Amino acid sequence: MSHIVTVAAKATDPAALAAACDRLKLPPPQTDTVTYFDRSVQTGLTIRPPGFVYPIVCDVETGDLYHDTYEGRWGDECFVGRLLQAYAVEKTKLQARARGHRCMETALADGSVRLTVTAGAAGFGDAPQYLTTGEAA
């Protein structure tokens, strides 16, 4: 039996989602309606990773991601983690740049990513700010 999974992380920014797809060398997300194996229907921005039977659907109003990998038989379940990591990195970079800050990215040995945000003219204190995303397993 197929299982639709709803991911708790929220992806609400179409520009960051498109940047995440570009980062993962995927085509840009397209608005579409998907009927999954269990006949459930989701509408939103669709991401079509290679090897997936059904696309990932992102509802940008709620931020929910929907996918059906049938316990890994219809797509790599780990890809959703990589997509969310890429989304978090790209969203942070977009927000930092919009505020006039510089952002430097460092890939860490455990698969996580460190972003160092350095204040622009408006500033945000004396020290650089760090964000480390979780491992994308």
Image: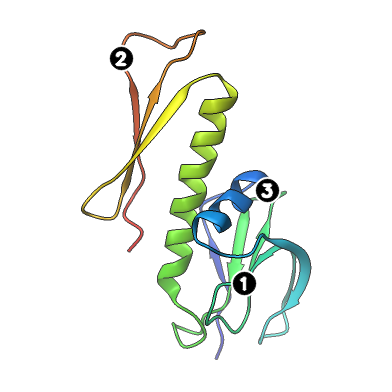
**Residue found 63% across the figure and 80% down from its top:** 54
- Tell me the crowding category of disc 1: few under 14, some 14 to 19, or many 20 or more residues within 10 angstroms, Cα based: some
Picture coordinates of residue 67 (x, y %)?
58, 72
Residue to which mark 1 is pinned: 48
Picture coordinates of residue 44 (x, y %)?
74, 61
- Tell me the crowding category of disc 3: few under 14, some 14 to 19, or many 20 or more residues within 10 angstroms, Cα based: some
Dot 3 lies on which element? helix
Vertical comparison of 97 with 35: above or below: above
Residue to which mark 3 is pinned: 14
Which residue is more in the foreground, 107 or 46?
107
Picture coordinates of residue 75 (x, y %)?
49, 80
**Residue found 32% across the figure and 9% down from its top:** 126
Which amino acid, mark 3? Answer: Pro
Which amino acid, mark 1? Answer: Arg
Which amino acid, mark 2? Answer: Ala
Left or right: 62 as drawn, with respect to 53: right
